[in-house]
Image (cartoon, helix red, strand yellow):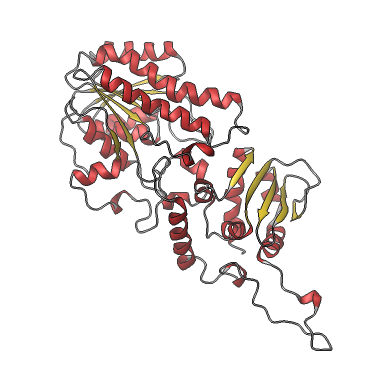
Amino acid sequence: MLPNTGKLAGCTLFITGASRGIGKAIALKAAKDGANIVIAAKTGEPHRTLPGTIYTAAEEIEAAGGKALPCIVNVREEQQIVDAVEKAVEKFGGIDILVNNASAISLTGTLETPTKKVDLMMSANARGTYLASKICLPHLRKSNIAHILNISPPLNLNPIWFKNHCAYTISKYGMSMCVLGMAEEFKGEVAVNALWPQTAIHTSAMDMLGGAGVEQQCRKTDILADAAYCILTKPKSFTGNFVIDENLLREEGIKNFDVYAVAPGHPLLPDFFLDVDPNTLAMKMEAHVEKTHLLGASPVFREGKKIESAKHEGPDGAESAAAKPLGPVAETFKIIQGAISEDVVRSTQGVYLFELSGDEGGTWYIDLKNKAGSAGIGEPPVKVDVVMSMSSNDFVKMFSGKLKPTMAFMSGKLKIKGNMALAMKLEKMMTQFSSKL
């Protein structure tokens, strides 16, 4: 990993969303130099599902060698940003670096994204970044360090990054456009850059989006912390750049990237907004899972073929109609039906409709909400919460563990309508189902 040089000793960093994840990792890296960290985040009380608060982050920062100022800040609230900046200037004498890390995400299509979610993403991502920059800039202009770093992607106009989550893309690109504009506006005074990961990063948000086991396809937050440290220790003349973490660290001489992997040697998910061919990566990951996980699986899930079971013959030597093997989709639903338990129904509380194309195409459902639960062909007798559209072959791969739902979604193989939280719950249930498939 990238060694600390001590260049940020005594510097004051104002980091939004620093109570956990990427923001906290950047804070801890700077703290090792003896930096002052303003933890500008919303979580003051322990969250029901997410780890850490601004106060637990402050303890970690001070244990690492830095000084911490925890501040309750919702970047959607201008006055909260103003108050936190004033406290920072009063305590530390100024602000040298701003890291715009706080962000909201909803990977939903235009018709499936409630206006409330649109407003959240636009105000937290684009507007929040703009406001925090605007309020910190008068103090940044007085600093010899003077950096703004936005955790946002390069401005890639490939339509693939708009079609499945238009509102989210607009909001993140708003952060990136702040880099484009402010780097020129404050050239020579304040450096303004963007940083984005080459691969998925294991955070609490990724756990929610990707479900069980997704961490094996991710890198640790350490890689972004190292890349951020590298940018923030460069002179002000390094500005207007859209930096990819791995590319920068390679330039800095880092050669072993396994140290950043959660599961060294496992294929990694590319992050959004980078033109890595999702279908190629999906094939590589399927091959990896096939090799390491499915060697002992039922033949129904090998290459999507029908069950290679012995045929039962009737008195005339013909194959009995009753013994005709089920297709992969029907066999999958048969096994799912047998795997449904009261605990699964109680913990999931969702009804899922699958619109499948190709062989065995048609409508199928899984009811994990009513009575003892059920699964089968056709429309469920109750209201549907989530609709998933994909090919029958990809459906079988997904439920047998060969294709991760996250990758299926990113590559366009899976389309989701309805309650995204319930869609994520189903992914967690898949680990229980796949062990029986």
User: What residue sits 34% from the left and 13% below the top?
Assistant: 135
Residue 338 appears in the rendering: yes
**Is residue 150 depicted above or below 187 in this figure?**
below
**Is residue 75 depicted above or below 382 in this figure?**
above
Residue 1 appears in the rendering: no
Residue lying farthest to the bottom in this orientation:
316
Q: Residue 420's quadrant in the figure?
A: top right
Q: Is residue 147 left or right of residue 368?
A: left
Q: Residue 138's quadrant in the figure?
A: top left
Name the image quarter holding the C terminus.
bottom right
User: What residue sits 25% from the left and 13% below the top?
Assistant: 139
- In percent of width and height, residue 419 lies at 64, 37
User: What residue sits 76% from the left and 82% below the top?
Assistant: 312
Q: Is residue 57 left or right of residue 185?
A: right
Residue lying farthest to the front in this orientation:
158
Q: Nearer the viewer, residue 62 or 394?
A: 394
**Is residue 352 depicted above or below 120 in this figure?**
below
- In percent of width and height, residue 157 lies at 42, 36
- In percent of width and height, residue 350 lies at 69, 43
Q: Is residue 304 left or right of residue 282?
A: right
Q: Residue 67's quadrant in the figure?
A: top left
